[in-house]
Image: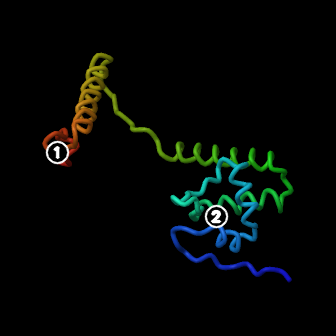
C-alpha cells in the first residue's frame, strides 16, 4: 500500500517523526543523513530531541531527490548540495552590491581624507557599542536621519 503525500502544516518546529511522515524518509535514515550531510543540521532541545525547521525539510527533500530520483550516491549528493550552497551564496553576494562612494571631482588627497574621516566615524561608533550602548547623541549627525 503506497503512502499518500501528506500536506505539511505551517509551524516553526517539526519533530523527527513528523518530518519522517512528511518526507517519506524513515527517522533512522534522517539521523544518518545528519551525520553525512553538513548542510543538514536540525536544532536539538536540551533533551536531545531534534527540532526541524522548514529549511531543514527543504534540504531533506533536495537530498531525497538527488539520492532517490536522480540516482546519486551519498558522496555525489554531498558534492551537489555543496555546489548548490555556493551558488546561492554567490547569487546573494552579487544581488547585494557594495556601498558605492562617489569620488567624482576629488583629488587623491581629498579621497584619502574623506575615507579617513568615514573610518574615524565608524571607529567611534564601534567604541560606543563596546562601551555599553549607543545613545542618539553618540551617533554622527548623518546616522540620526537628520543629515
Image mark for residue 29: none
Gap between marks 1 and 2, in whole Å? 42 Å
Residue 135, x across and y down, in percent? 17, 45
Q: Is residue 74 above or below residue 99?
A: below
Q: State left or right for residue 125 relative to residue 10.
A: left
Residue 67, x across and y down, in percent? 81, 57
Q: State left or right for residue 119 relative to residue 23.
A: left
Image mark for residue 135: 1
Dot 1: within a 10 Å radius of its alpha carbon, few (fewer than 14), some, or many (20 or more) residues?
few
Residue lying furthest front in this view?
47
Quarter holding the N terminus is: bottom right
Q: Residue at x 30, y 25 (%)?
A: 115
Q: Is residue 114 above or below residue 79?
A: above
Q: State left or right for residue 40 relative to residue 100.
A: right
Give the number of callouts: 2
Residue 46, x across and y down, in percent? 51, 58
Which badge, 1 or 2, comes first in the chain's sequence? 2
In front of the other: 58 or 83: 58
Q: Which residue is mark 2?
A: 57
Quadrant of residue 24 within the rendered picture: bottom right
Task: Tell me the SS state at disc 1.
Answer: loop
In front of the other: 64 or 21: 21
Q: Residue at x 83, y 61 (%)?
A: 68
Quarter holding the C terminus is: top left
Q: Assess whether mark 2 and mark 1 are in contact (beta carbons under 8 angstroms).
A: no
Q: Residue at x 29, y 16 (%)?
A: 109
Task: Tell me the SS state at disc 2.
Answer: helix
Q: Residue at x 69, y 45 (%)?
A: 82
Amino acid at each position: 500500500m503506497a503512502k499518500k503525500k501528506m500536506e505539511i502544516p505551517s509551524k516553526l518546529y517539526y519533530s523527527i517523526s513528523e518530518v519522517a511522515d512528511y518526507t517519506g524518509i524513515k527517522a533512522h535514515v534522517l539521523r544518518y543523513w545528519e551525520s553525512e550531510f553538513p548542510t543538514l543540521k536540525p536544532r536539538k532541545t536540551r533533551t536531545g530531541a531534534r527540532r526541524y525547521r522548514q529549511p531543514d525539510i527543504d534540504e531533506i527533500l533536495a537530498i531525497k531527490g538527488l539520492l532517490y530520483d536522480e540516482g546519486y550516491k551519498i558522496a555525489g549528493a554531498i558534492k551537489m548540495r555543496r555546489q548548490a550552497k555556493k551558488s546561492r551564496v554567490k547569487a546573494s553576494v552579487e544581488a547585494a552590491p557594495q556601498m558605492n562612494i562617489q569620488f567624482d571631482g576629488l583629488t587623491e588627497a581629498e579621497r584619502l581624507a574623506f575615507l579617513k574621516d568615514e573610518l574615524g566615524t565608524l571607529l567611534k561608533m564601534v567604541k560606543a557599542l563596546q562601551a555599553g550602548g549607543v545613545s542618539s547623541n553618540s551617533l554622527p549627525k548623518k546616522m540620526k536621519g537628520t543629515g
